[in-house]
Image (cartoon, grey):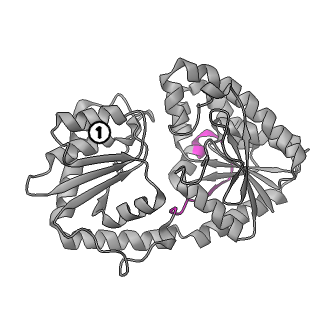
Amino acid sequence: MRILHVVTAFPRAPGDIIAPWLIELLRRQRAAGLEVEVFAPAYRGGGNNEFEGIPVHRFRYFPGRWEDLTHDQGTVDRVGHSIRYKLMAPFYVLAGMRAAWRLARRRAFDIVHVHWPVPHALFGWAARRGSGGRTRLVTLWYGIELRWVKSRLPWLKQFLKWALRASDEVVAISSYTGREIAELVHVPVRVIPYGLGFAESLPNRATAPSRATDGTFLILYVGNLIPRKGVRYLIDALHRLPATIAAQLLILGEGTDRAKLEAQVRELGLDGRVTMPGRVPEPDLHRAFHNAKVLVLPSIVDQRGDTEGLGVVLLEALSVAIAKALERVATDPAFAARLAETGSRRVRERFGWGAIIAAWQECYAAALRKRPRV
């Protein structure tokens, strides 16, 4: 079975850290006997055509000097902050549809697996058309695209409904996202989560490298530095921790909020307690997970699905709540150990790659059993 994964961004060279959970999915699908290929946009005129033996088909959509709508930063955030990127978006969509159609005419794909269906469901639809209906369309919904349309682009609601109905199989990464889809249109929805990019290859707790023994309480954040991730509240929470807790914060990632966060660190006098090295190679990421006492992901979403416009009282309460939670983990070792053990067990039971790959194989098989559509 040959699968074409349609993505917004993909590693441009070895060591380029982009969506490690997606990379792990592709690796494990290959190990299970599936043929996987990737369809992705070019970046400033270039990008690789192969990654770890996986063919990568990149399409051009703008002159190379300005061809940076994707990669290094979320496309949604770029479009929201620049008129240039708004103007670039139609070229991206049209060029992607044309390239997907042409690729599907040349290559016989059984499944086109679309990540981020807004707007990439159009690419999948074009590929299915190019194949003469032989290729089946599977769309994977992450949730943020649904909330983005609801809060900022309500005129695209009909596009969401079309994309869902046009799919041979609809998949959500969580039951919550599945319920959001059900509110839009009545279609069967599978729930298939991601596993961790390296969870099952890491040593277990008994054999993991020992953590820092100097009394430092290391707090870790990994992700994009953009408003909806709420990193500013984590920094504020660090400032609120009692002086008796020797806490350090390690922030791994890049994004539009970096300069603001660095300024916040300076204003709060946390220069010696916050480290922001940006993106790091996978071995360094492994080491950070081993050494950290706690991982904090303080993402925020308001009732509209947006990240701005929250009341000041709520924002202050969020910072205080994070600080209180961190204080308990830092001062109650038994509680922290129970959290770690429960979390580890839940991850292995609910997010093991064996079950995830089996679920995708069943999804693809079900799509192929459907009547061909053009």
Residue 163 drawn at (x, y percent): 70, 39
Give yes or no for residue 333 being in the magenta stretch. no
User: Can residue 302 be seen here?
Assistant: no
Q: Position of residue 81 (x, y in %)?
A: 47, 24
Question: In the rendered image, which quarter is residue 292 located in?
Answer: bottom left
The C terminus: image quadrant? top right
Tell me if 33 is positioned left or right of 308 in this view: right
The secondary structure type at the circle numbered 1 is helix
Q: Residues within 10 Å of mark 1 (few under 14, many from 20)?
A: many
Relative to 82, does residue 241 appear above or below in the rendering?
below
Q: In this figure, what is the number of numbered marks?
A: 1
**186 part of magenta stretch:** yes
Q: Of residues 78 and 333, which is closer to you in this image? A: 78
Q: Residue furthest bottom?
A: 206
Quarter occupied by the N terminus? bottom right
Residue for point 85% across, 45% down? 104
Apparent side of residue 171 relative to residue 337 in the rendered image (left or right): right
User: Which residue type carries mark 1?
Assistant: Arg
Q: Residue lying furthest right in this view? A: 132
Q: Residue at x 65, y 41 (%)?
A: 117
At horizontal 38% and vertical 68% (from top left) the residue drawn is 343
Label 1: which residue?
Answer: 232
Q: Which residues are magenta?
A: 181-197
- Give how far across and how far down residue 129 sits, in percent: 86, 40
Q: Nearer the viewer, residue 22 or 350?
A: 22
Q: Measured along the vertical axis of the image, is residue 284 above or below residue 101? A: below
Pick the residue in front: 152 or 236. 236
Residue 369 in the image: x percent, y percent?
Answer: 83, 60
Q: Is residue 324 above or below residue 299?
A: below
Relative placement, left or right, of 43 versus 218 is right
